[in-house]
């Protein structure tokens, strides 16, 4: 075996073993072995041969990871037998391990990891297309393609792929490959979808047998094979489908499932399919009855012709069958009665899945709702209207009786899409007859639970509350607002045995438990914390607590979010063996780690095993470490860093620029091909505009564009560069096809007003669909105006005949317009908004209140409209106020004082708006008005406030007089310190809260890391002297927002040691005004913190010192285990991805 492997690797892989600078012909281990043989030390020579085998295998496999093109070249060079072996390795799971006497190779893990590597996947994909169908049977090749494509996120499927697909596949292979393409439909571009459709239909069209005189090639089976691709059939092809074939297709067991997934069907095509279904019939001579889902389907139904719509719907109702998403475009309303309308409404539950056309669907539901309630009251039909009930206005909901809501609760509690104001109305109706909330009430409410008032939760018996929390209903607690959650916790904590029950507080609610309450519980263990959400302050305390009870840190690191509490001191204290064994746990929870924790991990890894260090960690170390990365390590550095999101890994923009410069250096200024795009990964989003415009080759551009779609924070320069490339590729919008426009949809906001005007004229529906996906985003005015123009041009609204001054002749917004426009509603003139129909305003006020781009004049106009419709603010109810959203920002101080703010939930809804009217003192005046109105309307004094009141008051607490803060009960304050610590109050108010916090946590010199994190911005209320006295080890545990809130004259009191210890995260939050007050020595310390310098060696480590790379003495990989060094279970495996198939290929070659 040894001689065989020696010859094998010398002949095939010897070249890649030599270092470029080496002048020797043999690997050092082989030289040593030869010398030992000459000396007669045969045992030593044998051991060296074993080490050489391992090194050669690992180096060879590593080469495939970092140079996947080499894999493609080698596979192209193999003979048929070798290629067959490599493909079999991909297909067969039975080869779990390869045992080479004293070396065991884990082939199963190698294969699994290889198929997660984009570059390796791409090579396997290309070689499969090139060679597989000539060597293996077609079914096996299709299986390989399926495995590779499903690991590629669809990026490998470009329009030109069809040129390489075989045209002569036999039936089973064709069906299987079509199934793969169906599964990847949503991940492929519109151009690729069209190309794959053409390939599929090219095979399906010929030959075909016409059995009924039809001229259509489309049969029932071919429709089933097409699956999602059936929406690419033309209108004429659909209308030519044989009635027998369409009837047979509908009878298939999986037809409904297939029709449930045609998310991109258009109204025209859907109605064409419906027309063919109506006119379908079966040949009764051959088939009498088809059984579907265990029930007989009587075939005469397919004898229905156009005009027999009602019979078809009635049949579908009786048999509980559905037309899938086609029902969303039903057009036979004139033949429906109330019962059939209700049936259709039930079948339209799924219509929200459609991409686009939602305004038309809402209109259809509204029409069906009117038919369904003909000759009956809304109270009588409420439970049979399905999710169309979300279209009921607040006026209609208020007219319902409590009894009607009770009767319909099993429907109402499952409906999605409710507005917040609707939930409040329905919850109040349901609970109108209940004096106290009970477990039974809550168990019936479902989604309506979010409308229950906080005071009602607080009024519950704590035993009923515990019953809720110990039942599956606890999952609904995550849908409650913070004030509601605090109302629940407040009640629980008042019980005598409250402390012992804290461990039972479920997942999402646990994060609201105060640090003070955690101190009282001693029964915590890693197991009970696994499913709980933790604030960082909770995690810091709990990790410190539990670390003392176990000598197995892996138990703590695997306990859900407890990893948030790991401090640098914990990491530093780990031995090299323990750290390396646990690193995978850190990496598995990477999204939970702070930049400071990642920086500490990087330093530890550098100290204990720099040769095997995951390269992305270098980005968090001082920039000199990054600069020291040699060209030979560039590829692995890019692959590792490209898997991370750089903006969360490196917060400082200057350092991020240095990282990107290193990336460009490693790329040598160009992305040459698709393989390089695979390597770069998420780094695409950070490449400068000049690189995007000139550094990405045409060959790589299509794949790069697929990656750029996921970039959410491109700069204006980057967007401009993308636009230039797109215009170069596709020409001006006048030349675009529908497929081009769909594929460019994520980038449409990058284009100019004139270019978007063309898109709005040619493809208004695509533009509107794109805008509907951007709700809540601040978009360019040019884009919004293009959307506005496209909607207004297609609107059928007539000028208003409203005699109100200024409104006569004005074309006002309709509900359809408002729904389609989304953020583009910001383009309405204030005068037009004021002239809106009252019914339209009532129906759409929540949509309008969610628009981010409204100016103050527009908000004032909408407020005036609210006064017109609802009367003066003094008469508004809670659901009115909640529905206003951002419109509430325009309320003046006197108007705010008129509101009924006796409910803390109403106050909390106002507090959600963080951007009150700009102007000198306006924000404070509005906040004071809200605070004062709540105290007056509720009858509470500051000393009476409960913890949930403090949470609900939110930002209005910042309007308190600092002298009033001591009046807050300590028992209530300590329960919500973390919530108050999220407020960005003035320095005097924060100082007042800090004094209150001292009553709970002691003086600042007594604060721990968990306390400092719990305090949040409250910690910014410390005095100069108190700040100077804080231990430098606490500096990373300031909340970043607290750093921002420290006044410059206070922040400058920090010592150079304290500033250097801030850590990269807090250092990144230091403001410009704070920097201006720092000395040159303090600025140098700040730069060290930004750079990720090690805090405990900040004085001794010179900035100019260069890191030293250690040569690897052996691969860290876990794929190769030597029998004499079988690892403990906890020992680490390599972070690299190794490919095992070429190893088998090479073995076959021998």
Image: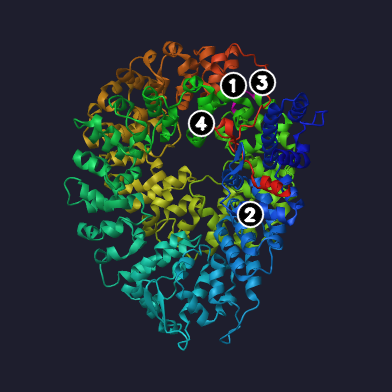
886 is higher (above) or lower (below) than 547: below
Residue density around tag 2, few if under 14, some if 14–19, many if 20 or more, within 10 Å = some
Residue density around tag 1, few if under 14, some if 14–19, many if 20 or more, within 10 Å = few
In this view, the mark in front (3 or 1): 1
Q: Secondary structure at mark 4?
A: loop
Dot 2 and dot 4 residues touching (CB under 8 Å):
no
Range of magenta residues: 620-624
Dot 2 and dot 3 residues touching (CB under 8 Å):
no
Determine which of the numbered discs, if any, sits on residue 607 in the image.
1
* Residue carrying label 3: 1107
Instruction: Work out how far the residue at label 4 is from the one at label 1, CA to CA, in angstroms.
Output: 22 Å
Q: Secondary structure at mark 1?
A: helix
Q: Secondary structure at mark 3?
A: loop
892 is higher (above) or lower (below) than 76: above
Q: Is 72 situated left or right of 875 in this image?
A: right
Q: Position of residue 931 (x, y in %)?
A: 31, 33
* Residue carrying label 4: 1128
Instruction: Work out how far the residue at label 2 is from the one at label 4, CA to CA, in angstroms.
Output: 32 Å
* Residue carrying label 2: 88
Instruction: Work out how far the residue at label 2 is from the one at label 3, CA to CA, in angstroms.
Output: 45 Å
Say whether disc 3 or disc 1 marks the residue closer to the N-terminus: 1
Residue density around tag 4, few if under 14, some if 14–19, many if 20 or more, within 10 Å = few
Q: Residue at x 50, y 55 (%)?
A: 821
Q: Residue at x 74, y 48 (%)?
A: 74
Say whether disc 4 or disc 1 marks the residue closer to the N-terminus: 1
């Amino acid at each position: 075996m040894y001689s065989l492997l020696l010859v094998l690797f010398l002949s095939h892989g010897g070249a890649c073993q030599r270092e470029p600078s080496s002048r020797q012909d043999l690997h050092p281990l082989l030289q040593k072995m030869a010398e030992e043989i000459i000396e007669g030390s045969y045992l030593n020579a044998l051991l060296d041969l074993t080490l050489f085998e391992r090194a050669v295998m690992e180096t060879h496999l590593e080469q495939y990871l970092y140079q996947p093109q080499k894999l493609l070249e080698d596979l192209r060079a193999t003979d048929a037998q070798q290629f067959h072996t490599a493909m079999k390795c991909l297909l067969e799971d039975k080869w779990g391990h390869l045992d080479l006497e004293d070396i065991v190779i884990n082939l199963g893990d190698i294969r699994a990891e290889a198929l997660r590597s984009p570059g390796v996947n791409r090579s396997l994909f290309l070689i499969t297309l090139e060679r597989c169908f000539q060597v293996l049977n077609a079914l096996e090749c299709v299986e390989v393609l399926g495995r590779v494509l499903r690991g590629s996120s669809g990026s490998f499927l470009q329009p030109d792929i069809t040129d390489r697909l075989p045209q002569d596949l036999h039936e089973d292979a064709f069906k299987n490959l079509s199934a793969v393409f169906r599964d990847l439909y949503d991940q492929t571009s519109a151009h690729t979808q069209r190309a794959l459709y053409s390939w599929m239909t090219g095979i399906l069209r010929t030959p075909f047998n016409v059995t009924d005189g039809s001229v259509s090639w489309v049969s029932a089976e071919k429709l089933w094979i097409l699956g999602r691709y059936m929406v690419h059939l033309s209108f004429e092809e659909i209308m030519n489908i044989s009635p027998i074939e369409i009837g047979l297709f509908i009878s298939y067991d999986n037809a409904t499932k297939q029709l449930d997934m045609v998310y991109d069907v258009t109204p025209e095509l859907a109605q064409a399919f419906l027309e063919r279904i109506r006119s379908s019939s079966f040949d009764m001579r051959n088939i009498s009855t088809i059984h579907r889902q265990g029930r007989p389907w009587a075939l005469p139904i397919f004898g229905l012709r156009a005009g027999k719509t009602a019979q078809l719907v009635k049949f579908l109702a009786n048999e509980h069958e559905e037309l899938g998403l086609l029902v969303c475009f039903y057009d036979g309303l004139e033949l429906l009665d109330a019962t059939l309308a209700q049936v259709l409404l039930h079948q339209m539950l799924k219509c929200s899945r459609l991409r686009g056309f939602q305004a038309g669907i809402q209109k259809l539901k509204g029409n069906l709702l009117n038919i369904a309630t003909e000759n009956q009251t809304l109270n009588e039909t409420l439970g049979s209207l399905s999710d169309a009930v979300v279209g009921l206005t607040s006026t209609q909901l208020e007219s319902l009786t409590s009894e009607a809501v009770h009767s319909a609760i099993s429907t109402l509690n499952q409906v999605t899409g409710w507005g917040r104001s609707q939930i409040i109305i329905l919850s109040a109706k349901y609970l109108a007859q209940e004096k106290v909330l009970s477990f039974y009430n809550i168990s019936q409410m479902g989604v309506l639970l979010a409308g229950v008032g906080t005071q009602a939760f607080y009024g519950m018996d704590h035993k009923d509350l515990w019953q809720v929390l110990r039942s599956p209903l606890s999952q609904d607690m995550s849908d409650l607002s913070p004030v509601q959650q605090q109302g629940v916790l407040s009640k629980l904590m008042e019980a005598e045995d409250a402390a012992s029950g804290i461990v039972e507080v479920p997942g999402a609610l646990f994060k609201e438990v105060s640090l003070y309450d955690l101190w009282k519980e001693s029964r915590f263990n890693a197991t009970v914390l696994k499913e709980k959400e933790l604030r960082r302050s909770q995690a810091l305390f709990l990790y410190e607590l539990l670390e003392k009870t176990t000598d197995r840190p892996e138990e703590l690191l695997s306990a859900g979010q407890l990893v948030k509490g790991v401090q640098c001191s914990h990491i530093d204290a780990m031995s090299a063996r323990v750290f390396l064994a646990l690193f995978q746990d850190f990496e598995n929870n990477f999204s939970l780690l702070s930049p400071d924790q990642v920086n500490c991990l990087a330093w530890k890894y550098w100290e204990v095993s720099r040769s095997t260090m995951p390269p992305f960690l270098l980005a968090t170390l001082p920039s000199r470490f990054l600069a020291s990365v040699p060209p030979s390590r560039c590829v692995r550095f890019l692959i590792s860093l490209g898997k991370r999101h750089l903006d969360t890994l490196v917060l400082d923009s200057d350092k991020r620029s240095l990282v990107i410069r290193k990336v460009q250096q490693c790329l040598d200024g160009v992305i040459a091909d698709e393989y390089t795009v695979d390597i770069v990964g998420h780094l695409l989003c950070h490449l400068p505009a000049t690189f995007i415009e000139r550094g990405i080759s045409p060959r790589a551009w299509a794949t790069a564009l697929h990656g750029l779609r996921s970039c959410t924070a491109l700069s204006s320069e980057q967007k401009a560069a993308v636009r230039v490339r797109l215009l170069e590729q596709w020409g001006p919008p006048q030349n675009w096809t529908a497929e081009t426009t769909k594929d460019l949809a994520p980038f449409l906001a990058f284009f100019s007003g004139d270019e978007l005007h063309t898109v709005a004229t040619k493809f208004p529906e695509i533009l509107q669909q794109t805008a509907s996906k951007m709700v809540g985003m601040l978009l360019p005015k040019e884009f919004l105006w293009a959307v506005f123009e496209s909607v207004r041009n297609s609107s059928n609204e007539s000028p208003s005949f409203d005699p109100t001054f200024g409104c006569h002749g004005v074309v006002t917004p309709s509900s359809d317009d408002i729904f389609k426009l989304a953020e583009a509603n910001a383009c309405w003139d204030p005068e037009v908004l004021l002239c809106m129909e009252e019914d339209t305003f009532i129906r759409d006020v929540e949509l309008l209140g969610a628009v981010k781009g409204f100016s103050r004049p527009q908000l004032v106009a909408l407020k005036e409209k609210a006064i017109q419709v609802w009367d003066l603010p003094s008469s508004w109810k809670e659901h009115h106020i909640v529905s206003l959203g951002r419109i509430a920002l325009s309320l003046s101080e006197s108007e705010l004082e008129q509101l009924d703010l006796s409910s803390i939930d109403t106050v909390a809804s106002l507090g959600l708006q963080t951007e009150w009217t700009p102007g000198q003192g306006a924000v404070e005046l509005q906040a004071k008005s809200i605070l004062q109105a709540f105290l007056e309307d509720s009858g509470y004094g500051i000393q009476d406030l409960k913890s949930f009141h403090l949470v609900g008051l939110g930002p209005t607490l910042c309007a308190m007089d600092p002298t009033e803060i001591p009046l807050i009960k300590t028992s209530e304050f300590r329960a919500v310190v973390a919530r108050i610590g999220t407020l960005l109050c003035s320095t005097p108010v924060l100082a007042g809260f800090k004094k209150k916090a001292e009553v709970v946590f002691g003086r600042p010199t007594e604060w721990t890391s968990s306390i400092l994190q719990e305090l949040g911005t409250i910690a910014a209320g410390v005095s100069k002297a108190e700040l100077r006295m804080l231990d430098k080890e606490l500096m990373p545990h300031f909340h970043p927002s607290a750093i921002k809130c420290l006044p410059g004259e206070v922040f400058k009191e920090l010592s150079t040691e304290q500033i250097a210890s801030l850590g990269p995260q807090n250092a990144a939050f230091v403001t410009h005004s704070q920097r201006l007050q720092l000395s040159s020595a303090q600025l140098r310390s700040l730069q060290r913190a930004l750079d990720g310098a090690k805090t405990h060696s900040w004085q001794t480590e010179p900035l100019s010192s260069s890191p030293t790379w250690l040569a690897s003495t052996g691969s860290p990989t876990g794929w190769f285990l030597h029998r004499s060094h079988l690892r403990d279970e906890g020992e680490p495996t390599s972070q690299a991805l190794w490919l095992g198939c070429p190893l088998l290929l090479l073995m076959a070659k021998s």
